[in-house]
Amino acid sequence: MNASVAIQTLPEAKDDEELIRIVDEVIAYIKSTGNNYYVGPFETTIEGDYDELMDIVKECQHIAVKAGAPSVAAYIKVSYKPEGDVLSIERKVTKHHQ
């Protein structure tokens, strides 16, 4: 696991219910990839291979538009370590959720 990506998808939506519905579709897509992930209140973090994660980030925008968003913005954070592993989600947050 040489990368960790946090993505906050911000679709344009007519109201909060529509926004949540679209974001839920993006999260369902992330779940379907089989990568380890963690859903937080503002962003979802995914771990895996850097190139695969970049493809997932790109597809998240497409999913939001297919779900009905006329436009979408995203904030992305990337931790990448070409040689070796990045710190895992588990190592970063587990101690705070016991």
Image: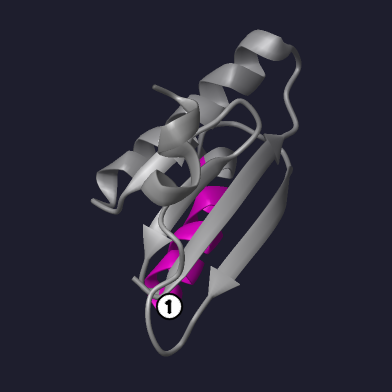
The image shows residue 49, relative to residue 84, as above or below, that is: above
Observer-nearest residue: 62 or 91? 91
Image coordinates of residue 8 in percent, x first then y, are 65, 43
Q: Is residue 9 magenta?
A: no
Q: Residue at x 53, y 19 (%)?
A: 21
- Where is residue 64, by image quadrant? top right
Image coordinates of residue 43 in percent, x first then y, are 60, 38
Q: Residue at x 44, y 34 (%)?
A: 95
Dominant SS of magenta comes to: helix
- Boundaries of the magenta span: 50-63
* Amino acid on which disc 1 is placed: Asp
Q: Is residue 53 magenta?
A: yes
Observer-nearest residue: 23 or 12? 23
Under circle 1, the secondary element is helix
Viewport quadrant of the C terminus: top left
Image coordinates of residue 13 in percent, x first then y, are 72, 24
The image shows residue 96, relative to residue 85, as above or below, that is: above
